[in-house]
Image (cartoon, helix red, strand yellow):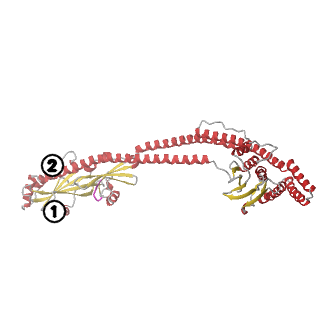
């Protein structure tokens, strides 16, 4: 299976995380800038719409004032009184009233040509300043009287239109006002001021362009004024929709356009501005370009920095990998040069120490193996010690000379079994039960030599009999107990015990002999191993080589008397 680089994966993940973070920050910045710019655009345009709404409101107030001046004019009231008294309106009276109305209208600033006045008295006589905006006054009079029944002095009515001689339409709205005596409040008719829609459009038309558009609508969204006259009397659906959903909070968004509205106080109308979002958010383009450039720069810098860092990390690790490969191939002289970085310096120091430790352990292992083989050779030599052979053969000859052939035969039997085992070069480890059989032959020979001056008791746990132990490690202990423990006129009792505990094997060899002082015990463990001598220290060193420093042999004074030797070995 193909191996993948962990460092490469980690840095790719880190790169992706950083890119996500950069993208999130750029997106958040963009959205925040968008909201700020949008608020500024709304605020600036709202301020402008407030000024337009104030001007339109003043225009309408001026029209109402104009209507009041005409409606309260005493000359017109006097003329209408005569007409209401039964006198029919003659041409002189008609011209007089129309002349007075014309005088008021032409005194109304420079927009006088946008206003026509129509006065309808109670008898249905009509007085007009112009016939260009004619309408059905009889039908209008009933509607106007009904609209004015609510006690209002004046009322503004929706946009109307008429077909001109040139084939187009003119649009106008009407202001109706009662004509009454100021003192007596006597009603003499209705005054209609037909005001051209251009009076409203002049307030915003100069601000209209490809990006901005303006509407004057009523509360139902009906368009009252717009630069495109064909849209007048249509509904501004987005305004209606926003208003019906109670979302009309001075502005709303629709079809990539920003709509901002401002009420015209006192009339139930609204001036609505439509601004292209692209135009409104034009300053955001610069921020967008900056964020894109910033993101690209951050991406490049992040990639370069991560690449450099990855290489800085990968190079020492690659070096360590190569050195470990050389080590696996058997090169034990390798060393890693110290790094300037703390972490890799610690790794290189630890690796160098590991190599030194391995070299030390290898040398120690070679020495241990050499010492182990020397000890084994020493043990083999011990089993065929010339003095032991000479003494045993001398005892056999003595029994033969004494005519004790049975004893000589028995001694020769046990001696031959010992020699067979030693000379056969048995394995390094044997079962305890087999080692006991060897000891029984050895003890039998020693008993015949020392005339049954001692006995050996084997008190072994049944579970311990099948445990393997190093061969020939018990015989030197028993030999030492016999040699140093025998006393005149006293039976020496040697006990061999074995038990298992916590994966360890404990073999105890105790006697009731003379015993050993603490100085003698210390002398035994401090004495150097000699090639020509086998003893307790030899057994101790062999166990430590095989099992480690936690194992070996200890010597204690037996209670109440004698010596106790404890061998600790590992069995699992």
Structural distance between the alpha carbons of marks 1 and 2: 26 Å
Report the front residue among 373 and 506: 506
Report the front residue among 359 and 32: 359
Report the front residue among 130 and 305: 305
Residue 162 lies in what quarter of the image? bottom left
- Residue 528: image location, x then y, percent: 76, 41
- Residue 97: image location, x then y, percent: 12, 53
Which callout, 1 or 2, points at the residue further toward the start of the chain? 2
- Residue 313: image location, x then y, percent: 60, 41
Q: Is residue 209 magenta?
A: no
Tell me if mark 2 has few (under 14), some (14-19) or many (20+) residues whose alpha carbon lies within 10 angstroms of its own. some
Q: Main secondary structure of the magenta part?
A: strand
Write the residue at 35% across / 45% down: 40
- The magenta region covers 216-220
**Residue picked out by circle 1:** 149
Residue 493 lies in what quarter of the image? bottom right
Measured along the vertical axis of the image, is residue 86 above or below residue 297? below
In the rendered image, the quadrant that contains the C terminus is bottom right
Q: Return the mark for residue 104.
A: 2
Report the front residue among 570 and 164: 570
């Amino acid at each position: 299976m193909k191996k993948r680089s962990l460092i490469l994966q980690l840095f790719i993940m880190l790169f992706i995380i950083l890119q996500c973070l950069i993208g999130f920050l750029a997106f958040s910045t963009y959205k925040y800038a968008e909201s700020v710019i949008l608020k500024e655009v709304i605020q600036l345009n709202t301020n402008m719409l407030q000024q337009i709404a104030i001007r339109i409101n003043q225009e309408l107030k001026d029209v109402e004032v104009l209507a009041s001046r005409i409606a309260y004019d005493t000359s017109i009231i006097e003329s209408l009184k005569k007409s209401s008294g039964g006198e029919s309106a003659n041409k002189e009276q008609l011209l007089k009233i129309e002349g007075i109305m014309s005088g008021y209208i032409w005194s109304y600033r420079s927009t006088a040509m946008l206003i026509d006045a129509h006065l309808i008295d109670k008898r249905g006589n009509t007085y007009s300043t112009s016939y260009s905006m004619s309408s059905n006054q009889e039908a209008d009079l009933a509607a106007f009287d009904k609209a004015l029944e609510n006690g209002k002095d004046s009322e503004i009515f929706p946009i109307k239109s008429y077909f001109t001689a040139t084939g187009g339409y003119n649009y106008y709205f009407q202001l109706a006002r009662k004509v009454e005596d100021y003192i007596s409040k006597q009603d003499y008719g209705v005054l209609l001021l037909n005001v051209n829609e251009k009076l409203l459009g002049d307030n915003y038309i100069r601000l209209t362009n490809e990006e901005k558009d303006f509407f004057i609508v009523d509360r139902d969204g009906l368009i009252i004024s717009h630069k495109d006259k064909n849209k007048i009397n249509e509904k501004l659906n987005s305004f209606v929709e926003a208003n019906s959903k109670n979302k009309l909070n001075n502005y709303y968004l629709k079809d990539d356009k920003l709509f901002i509205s401002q009420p015209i106080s006192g009339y139930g109308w609204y001036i609505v501005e439509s601004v292209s979002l692209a135009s409104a958010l034009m300053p955001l383009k610069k921020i967008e370009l900056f964020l894109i450039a910033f993101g690209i720069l951050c991406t490049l810098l992040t990639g370069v920095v991560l690449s450099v860092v990855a290489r800085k990390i990968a190079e020492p690790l690659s070096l360590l990998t190569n050195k470990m490969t050389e080590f696996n191939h058997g090169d034990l002289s390798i060393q890693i040069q110290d790094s300037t970085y703390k972490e890799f310096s610690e790794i290189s120091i630890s690796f160098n120490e590991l190599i030194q430790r391995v070299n030390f352990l290898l040398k120690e292992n070679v020495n241990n193996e050499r010492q182990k083989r020397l000890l084994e050779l020493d043990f083999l030599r011990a089993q065929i010690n010339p003095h032991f052979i000479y003494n045993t053969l001398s005892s056999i000859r003595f029994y033969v000379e004494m005519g004790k052939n049975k004893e000589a035969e028995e001694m020769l039997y046990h001696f031959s079994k010992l020699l067979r085992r030693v000379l056969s070069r048995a394995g390094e480890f044997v079962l305890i039960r087999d080692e006991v059989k060897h000891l029984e032959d050895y003890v039998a020979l020693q008993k015949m030599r020392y005339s049954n001056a001692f006995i050996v008791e084997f008190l072994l746990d049944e579970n311990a009999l099948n445990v393997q132990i190093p061969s020939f490690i018990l015989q030197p202990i028993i030999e030492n107990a016999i040699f140093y423990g025998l006393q005149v006129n006293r039976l020496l009792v040697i006990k061999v015990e074995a038990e298992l505990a916590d994966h360890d094997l404990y073999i105890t060899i105790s006697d009731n002999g003379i015993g050993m002082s603490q100085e003698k015990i210390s002398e035994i463990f401090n004495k150097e191993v000699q090639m020509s001598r086998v003893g307790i220290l030899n057994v101790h060193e062999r166990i430590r080589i095989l099992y480690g420093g936690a194992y070996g042999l200890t010597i204690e004074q037996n209670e109440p008397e004698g010596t106790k030797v404890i061998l600790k070995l590992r069995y699992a």
